[in-house]
Amino acid sequence: MSSTLITIERFLLEQQPHSAEGDLTTLFYDIALAAKMIAKQTRRSALLDILGYEKTTNIQGERQRKLDVYADEMIYRMNDHTGRLCAMVSEERDDWIPIPANYKKGKYVLVFDPLDGSSNIDTNVTIGTIFGIFRALDLNNRGRLEDCLRSGKELVAAGYIIYGTSTMFVYSAGQGVHGFTLDPEIGEFLLTHENMRFPEKPTYYSMNYGAYSYWDPGVQAFGDWLQTAQETPLSARYIGSLVGDFHRNLLYGGIYGYPAEKKYSNGKIRLLYEAGPMAFLAEQAGGYGSDGYGSLLEIKPKTIHQRTQVFLGNREIVQKAEEFIRKTNLSK
């Protein structure tokens, strides 16, 4: 870490001035402020009675945890009135979110999963927030569904916040991936990981082998190859948090996979606000994101909560997954 304290704003202004144009820098700060509030509640959740479930379910049919609801509301409240957004999409809400009529609308669209890996909340395991940012298609409109249903290749920026032993804000505005760690004493995210890239030699694979019998034969063959067919088989690390598993593999090299299975026949990860942003980050870090057949960034969602099969990580390993899946399909 440099002895110079570099905030997200300073980094954008000095290193990525093109990305700092307009409201994007301030939008990052709005998201960062929400992240600080979520991190604070996450650290104190057991003391504040926000562990456990609400009585409600989200559009996915999943019971909402109290911290899920808090994180969703915090991100919404930090962004609904700023004049920087024309629409939002959240995992926790049935429909896309228009900006209230009494507030000025902006030129960006924010899509987000407020609390990824929330099944880990009560067990004190890593969780995170995922977000993506698009430009509005028509600046004269207040925001429409069409502004939200976009492929990952149209993203202006994407990132995640990981809440673990420390809180990190990792983002890309199309010029590399950069990580900032929250200093709780001064309440600011400071640059600690500049130009993050997947190491050339991968170390880990992150897949739920408990669902192996429900995977497509091509995915099973790929899983077998990960464990046995390489000179130095990769080590298994899986915690069930996309942010946590992806972040570890970004630092050490590897692949995260969530294949289609019996319960989730089209895959579980949501394309718009989870898979797309993470694939954007993967490619900016020298990696690749695929649904097993091609780039996740090329897929335009038909609905805001559309699910997909996902493989993210070192490019050559993700392409190996595609190879096994294609080979199996051709032999059918």
Image (cartoon, rainbow, N blue to C red):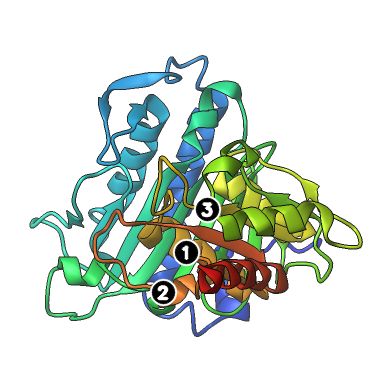
* Residue at position x 59%, y 80% in the image: 175
In front: mark 1 or mark 3?
A: 3
The answer to whether marks 2 and 1 mark residues whose Cβ atoms lie closer than 8 Å is: yes
**Quarter assignment of residue 209:** top right
Q: Earlier in the sequence, mark 3 or mark 2?
A: 2
**What distance separates the C-alpha of mark 1 from that of mark 3?**
18 Å
* Residue at position x 49%, y 79% in the image: 19
**What distance separates the C-alpha of mark 3 from that of mark 2?**
24 Å
User: Looking at numbered disc 1 in the image, what kind of residue is underneath it?
Assistant: Pro
Q: Which residue has dot 2 on it?
A: 155
Question: Is label 3 in a helix, a strand or a loop?
Answer: loop
User: Looking at numbered disc 2 in the image, what kind of residue is underneath it?
Assistant: Leu
Q: Which residue has dot 3 on it?
A: 259
In front: mark 3 or mark 2?
A: 3
Q: Residues within 10 Å of mark 1 (few under 14, many from 20)?
A: many
Q: Nearer the viewer, residue 32 or 158?
A: 158
Q: Which residue has dot 1 on it?
A: 277
Could you tell whether 110 is left or right of 206 in the image? left
